[in-house]
Amino acid sequence: MSGTKTVALTIDGRTVTAVEGANVLRAAERAGIDIPHFCYHPAFAAEGNCRMCLVEIEGLPKLELACSTPVREGLVVRTATERVTQARRDVLEFLLADHPLDCPICDKAGECKLQDHYDRYGRFPGRFVEAKQKKDKLVRIGRGLVLDRERCILCTRCVRFLRNVTGTGELGVFERGARAEIGVFEGAPVDNSYAGNLVDICPVGAITAEDFRFRTRAWFLARNPSVCPHCSRGCAVIVESVSGYPLPGGKRRVYRITAGENPAVNGYWICDLGRAGRRDIDEGRAAGLLKKGVPVDGGPWQKALTEVTAAIKAVPVSDRPARIAVILNARLTCEELVRAKRLFVTGLGLGRVFFADRKPGAADSLLLTTERVPNARGVLDSGLEARPPLLEDLAGITALLVFGSGLAEHFPEEAIGRTLAAIPSKFLFAAHAGPFDRLFDLAFPVAVPPEKSGTYINVAGVRQSFGRALVAPAGAVPEGEILTGLAQGLGIDLGDPDVR
Amino acid sequence: MSEDAVRLIPADEGSWRLEAYLRRGGYEAARRAVTSMAPADIIAEVRRAGLRGRGGAGFPAGLKWSFVPQGVGGPKYLCVNADEGEPGTFKDRAILVRDPHRLLEGMVIAAFAVGIRTAVIYVRGEYERIAGRLRAAVAEAEGAGFLGRTIFGSEFGLDVVIHFGAGAYICGEETALLESIEGRRGAPRLKPPFPAVVGLFRSPTVINNVETLAHVPSIIGRGADWFMSLGLPKDCGTRLFSVSGAVRRPGLYELPTGIPLRTLIEDHAGGPPEGVSVKAVIPGGLSAPVLRADELETHLDFESMALACSMAGSAGVIVIGDRTPMLEVLGVMSRFYAHESCGQCTPCRIGTSWIHRTVTRIAAGQGRRGDLDLILSLADGIKGRTLCPMGDAAALPIRALVTKFRGELEQAAER
Amino acid sequence: MSYAPSAAVLARIDRAVAAYPERSAALLPVLHLIQEESGWIPPEAEVWTADKLGLRPVRVREVLSFYTMFRRRPAGRTVIQICRNLSCTLAGAEEVIAAVRRELGLGAGADTTADGAVTLVTVECLGNCDHAPCLQVDGVDRGPVTRESAAAIVKELRGR
């Protein structure tokens, strides 16, 4: 439909180039000219129901929608005239007429399009003196989502998302006129693993997540980009957290994961598994260094690491390939995997290097992959072999290093106890507390992926580098630093970490 | 040819049947069109005749037909708009009940001209009980080879489906009508694309009003020149005027376009009843801005009405007598548009409701200073801003009523 | 509790469906047929219709709740419709409505008689304005009516 031909048009006196077939709203956006809107979303065809994006098009008598007017050579658009200003005010006034004054209790406050547009394009006293229509404010529509019908502005983004993206179509528009409302059919609630996106795309606080409701305020949230580590799609995510005020005692909490935009990977969406990954960051974290399950208050982790290097050095060089085993995981970044290879394979000459990871699950037709690890391609790329460990592989070894919490996925519980008991020196480097922590001589807390910087390679081979989205809890270290520390202690040169 | 042959509504009740229609010269024009005319020539003739849509918008019918792309594969559709929801209008009903074959003949000619093989007659749900004759006429025409697989023995065929609405004025808007036929809420579509290109089931579609199509057999049968000899140069032919309200003889009047409103009301419909004088007239269905008693010289054609800041619309003439409080009229108007708004777009959904609630409050004796100005302002917020023409259909008549009867409304509000 | 139309209605439903190029487009005629037989369209019938036409039930409800002629609650065996639009109001529709409500014994806010036999619905323009005030009984035009003649119609109905 739209080719690569570019056209030049004029918006507010500025010449703007755009791809033929694009709409005026997007062309303006890309040129830094904001045209306020509610119902338009770049993932869908223009809907044209909010009427907020009306602009002047030279040569046409009526105001026209920027979202559904295609650009063409020589088009002249004006977005800042008195007519346009008045039209925006009128739409805002209409929307605010029945809209409840919920801002003080509404989760969307601070990131609400109605607030934002009123603040920028409104600021007039309202004239509505009738009784506002009362509607249901707590409609549970499924997947932990709550619909507030008084707040809804009927932009239908939610309805269209479920029809066009997930194809599940659970939401519909009932009644007509000012009585129109969004709803589900009883017994058929929203039930798909992309439902969380509905909260992201609702421009107001009509659809909220029970998981987020009433817990914090948007303006306290630090929003930092990362790459989701829960499957190998590598969706762009935004980690939204509060560190310190208003949390007591300088705590840190991740309140939600929202979708980041990446046209090359996930478009505009993430799946609910990725959103649930919020828990992976905050909950069940290894609290501190443990010695056989007992907290150690013995100074920095570097000092404890000498015990690990000592255990490795104690194994004769010629015995190391058979007597030392390392279990890695595919949540390690490419940089960490390269270091691991240089340390364990090239440096120590180990043969028993394995990968224990989350078991694969069912893929869906959108984003979720069968692999439930972020960097399986990174493992391939590093030259390490992604062998899962068998119990036999751990028999008769003298030292074991386990990175991650994957053991429990691979072996039955009692087998782990037996196996570990037979190994003289064993060390764990995991982000989360686990039932076997007490079996390890030392258990080091490590960072989770959003607390690291590095690169993942996704299922389609796309390399994505990400920076730290969060500061790790005190004492938790990225595995990369552990590996560097071990290498230093063993006198192994890891070379330039950026050279593959 | 007798006058009955070209009058849209025959006088005799039994004239609706096929045999009576044939005696009146029925299906001769269709025969000529299908067996010996080129489709392009039919379109040209209808264009030349200047037949304008009789549903309300007055768009030239032949021009609309010419928008359908020719030479593309796939089905095309003809939709007949028999939704007749514009208050004060009851002409299409009369055609369906008293001259259904004339409609069918017009459909055959139109479909042949545009290359359409399936027609859907969208009849408002409230006419379901009187649709028996229409159904019978379709059966008669199919039986006689005027509809169906091979019409007049040619390769051209036309299937007719009758689809009933279910109580939504908005389904008279052409894209909402399409949505309704496709089994959805009557929410109008964004245009472009236009139905001529992307219409029913995404195929090219022509949508015409019942009366518009009912004029086609006469145009083809007697020629465009004949049609142009009636009415005005830019607004040819006759129209069915629905007259109701404060008149002695409410009913349908088929007259050439362009007669003065006063002539229609007084000479044809008998003027107001004894003891009543005319206060106001709505000339083109409820959505046509009201005219005051001193504006009755306005002529009933598209241009004259537009110049008078009203519209010819559906030619539904509602006469309001001097005993009727305009606040009551405003109440009916505002309630109607709020009730019929599909709810899709912001200005109409909320604007019509807000106006209705304001008027209701005024009517309940709780009017405030500034209410009428507010209503005007809200109407301005709707006008020209909506997804479909219903916004203007609501805003313009409300605006006109409040402006032209401001004094009376202010007095009523203060009580 | 599940729904099924009678065999006769099912046959008409199948004919209606066959007339459309897409099954789902037959939604309005199917709902009309169901309501004609059952008097209203219960949720079970929404589910049945959805299944029949390859739609989700929510889509059926969208249409059911949009169009005012479809009933989501049971109505009386007899439905009286009175138009309140302009020509009918000018001709005295409000008085007719009041008279009919009195005659039916409908309290404020009620639209169906206590015995569930008759439902009164006020509607917008029925397209019969030269016979204002317009009153329909089960879809059949009985206008023009006066307060008296409308009350008489009700009496006659109640006498049935």
Image (tube, coloured by chain):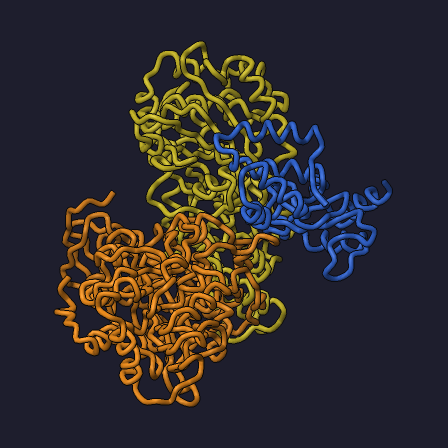
> Relative to B18, does residue C159 appear above or below in the rendering?
below
**Tint of chain C:** blue
**Tint of chain B:** yellow
Task: Identify which residue is drawn at 69% across, 50% down.
Answer: C73
- Residue closest to the eye, A396 or B108: A396
The image position of residue A375, as x and y in percent, is 29, 59
**Tint of chain A:** orange
The answer to whether residue A208 is seen in the rendering is yes
- Residue closest to the eye, A476 or B312: A476
The image position of residue A274, as x and y in percent, is 40, 63
- Residue closest to the eye, A320 or B215: A320
Q: How many marks?
A: 0
> Relative to B222, does residue C153 appear above or below in the rendering?
below
> Relative to A357, does residue B232 appear above or below in the rendering?
above
> Relative to A415, does residue B248 appear above or below in the rendering?
above
Whether residue A385 sits left or right of residue B281 in the image: it is: left
Specify the quadrant that holds the N terminus of chain A: top left
Tell me the quarter of the picture where residue C34 sits. Answer: top right
Whether residue C123 sits left or right of residue B177 in the image: it is: right
Task: Identify which residue is drawn at 58% across, 45% down.
Answer: B167
